[in-house]
Image (cartoon, rainbow, N blue to C red):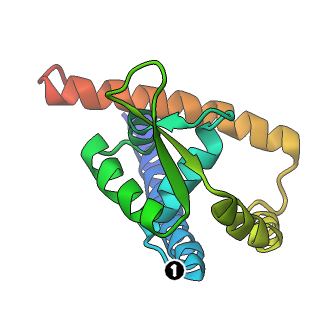
């Protein structure tokens, strides 16, 4: 019984650390967004597109999946970002029902202008961790994320 309580305490501490990290990352994303004159959600959309685009644009549904949000929200926000000339939305050559979304040169330039600050921020956030430690941590967090999705699904259908 004592072992179960200890594990419970460690898991609880871990969850609260994740909550704190999430909160701080939200504040950081808000700051980056403010520097570009956009919302935090729009900043995350730009970052997701930047991450996912391999030169041919990204479907909106891929961005929605990456951010775990509704595709209609992506459509709404990408229209706004297009008006701000931060991205382009072109009809997919494979399927005219879908759009391929890409960052504009203006967006790439704005993001590049922030890169020195972002690198300094990363050094602050991950100070004391070498590349190998970060790889290890990322592997463990990926596993926890996968298991969390499974646990959430089980909970929602009443298995747990």
Q: Mark 1 sits on what residue?
A: 37
- Left or right position of 89 against 47: left
Q: Is residue 37 visible from the viewing direction of this image?
A: yes
Quadrant of the image occupied by residue 62 = top left
| Residue 112 against residue 143 in the figure, above or below | below
Comparing 10 with 5, the one in front is: 10
Q: Position of residue 160 (x, y in %)?
A: 19, 24
Q: Name the residue rendered at 77%, 72% in the picture.
A: 113
Comparing 73 with 117, the one in front is: 73
Comparing 90 with 20, the one in front is: 90
| SS at mark 1 in the image | loop
- Left or right position of 147 against 102: left
Q: Name the residue rendered at 60%, 81% in the picture.
A: 35
Which quarter of the rendering shows the N terminus? top left
- Left or right position of 140 against 100: right
Q: Where is residue 10 in the image (x, y as percent from the top left)?
A: 49, 47
Q: Is residue 17 visible from the viewing direction of this image?
A: no
Q: Name the residue rendered at 66%, 65% in the picture.
A: 106
Q: How many marks are shown on the rendered structure?
A: 1
Q: Residues within 10 Å of mark 1 (few under 14, many from 20)?
A: few
Quadrant of the image occupied by residue 78 = bottom left
Q: Where is residue 61 in the image (x, y as percent from the top left)?
A: 38, 34
Q: Name the residue rendered at 46%, 18% in the picture.
A: 94
């Amino acid at each position: 019984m004592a072992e179960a309580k200890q594990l419970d305490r460690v898991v609880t501490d871990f969850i609260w650390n994740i909550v704190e990290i999430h909160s701080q990352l939200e504040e950081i994303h808000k700051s980056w967004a403010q520097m570009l004159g956009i919302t935090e959600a729009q900043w995350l959309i730009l970052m997701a597109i930047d991450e996912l685009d391999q030169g041919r644009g990204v479907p909106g549904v891929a961005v929605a999946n990456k951010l775990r949000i509704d595709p209609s929200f992506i459509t709404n926000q990408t229209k706004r970002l297009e008006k701000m000339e931060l991205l382009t939305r072109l009809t997919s050559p494979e399927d005219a029902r879908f759009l391929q979304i890409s960052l504009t040169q203006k967006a790439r330039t704005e993001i590049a202008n922030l890169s020195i600050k972002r690198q300094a921020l990363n050094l602050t956030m991950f100070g004391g961790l070498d590349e190998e430690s970060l790889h290890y941590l990322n592997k463990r967090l990926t596993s926890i994320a996968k298991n969390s999705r499974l646990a959430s699904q089980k909970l929602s259908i009443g298995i747990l």
